[in-house]
Amino acid sequence: MTTVTAPAPARARINDGVHLTFGRVLRSEAIKLLTLRSTWWSIIVVAILSLGLAAIVAASMNSFMDPSARTADDLARSVASAVLAPIQFTMLLAGALGAIAVTGEYSTGMIHSTLAAEPRRGVVLAAKAIVVAVLLAVLSLVVFALSTIPVAAILDTTPFSAADPGMVVLPILYGSLAMAVFAIIGLSFGFILRSGPGAIAATVGLLFVLPIIGSIFPSEGAWSWLHDAAQYLPMFAAQVVTSPPAEIGMSIPIALLTLGCWVVAGLLSGWAVLRSRDA
């Protein structure tokens, strides 16, 4: 009698010490983000809000500005202010997009495949953060640049006609940076909470609700420290860097440092949670 021995099950290949290159991880995260319908809907809404609200703000400015008293610098400040005014609303979309980029994977279970392909969790977090930040920065820069066209036409000027082009260019560049920061904040909450509604609610609370609460307290008296602390929230720091030079309060370096601290704190918190919990 011939005995047939069944073949032993193949052992799973263990790629000890072998990892994807960071460039491939970045490419993978970019493909995942850009193939989500929610990403493109967010982009469309950001573009429409930015262009529409900028034109409305410019029209309201034009209605009370004295044409004979307009200087090149005044027009430059008006262009920058109108173009960047929608950030107060589009920042919430940027934060929501950052949150969805993470929580969408947890809700579908794709995070298991992501971490199986790249077990180094810090690499995954860094790649997601870079892809989300670059997307929002580039998108915002393009939308803001396009917004200068109708705004300048309404104000009867050219987008960069001031003696100091930095009065328009620098605020727009800083505004694009701020949008990337808002997205990273949402992404950080996504890693911390792992829930889409929870991460979006936390992002809205930090970016929109807390500034309102902080502004309620007086700038003088026993409760003034709450008012002062609120000035270091992401929204107020973003307002500083996106304001024309004549309108700022806090210095731009301090505001940029504040935004950087929020990014570092958020990513470190997300990395700590990602390392300490199972996917």
Image (cartoon, helix red, strand yellow):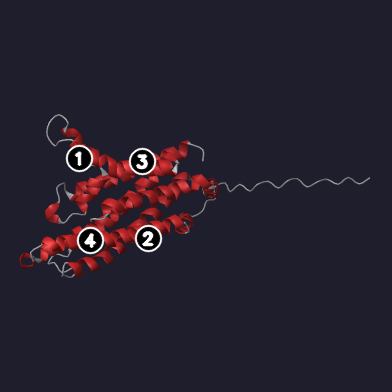
The image quadrant where one finds the N terminus is: top right
Residue 119 visible from this viewpoint: no
Q: How many other residues sit within 10 Å of disc 4, few (<14), some (14-19) or many (≥20)?
A: some
Please report whichever mark, 1 or 4, sits nearer to the chain's N-terminal start.
4
Please report whichever mark, 1 or 3, sits nearer to the chain's N-terminal start.
3
**Location of residue 39 (image quadrant):** bottom left
CB atoms of marks 1 and 2 within 8 Å? no
Please provide percent x and percent y for residue 258.
25, 45
Task: Give the vertical position of 68 relative to 3 (above or below).
Answer: below
Q: The disc labelled 1 sits on which kind of residue? A: Ser
Q: Residue 44 — which label?
A: 2
Please report whichever mark, 4 or 3, sits nearer to the chain's N-terminal start.
4
What residue did someone put label 4 on?
Answer: 56
Please provide percent x and percent y for residue 35.
48, 59
Q: The disc labelled 2 sits on which kind of residue? A: Ile
Please report whichever mark, 1 or 2, sits nearer to the chain's N-terminal start.
2
Badge 4 element: helix
Please report whichever mark, 4 or 2, sits nearer to the chain's N-terminal start.
2
How much space separates mark 4 and mark 2, taking CA atoms?
A: 18 Å
CB atoms of marks 2 and 3 within 8 Å? no
Q: The disc labelled 3 sits on which kind of residue? A: Ala
What residue did someone put label 1 on?
Answer: 215
Residue 44 visible from this viewpoint: yes
Q: Residue 202 — which label?
A: 3
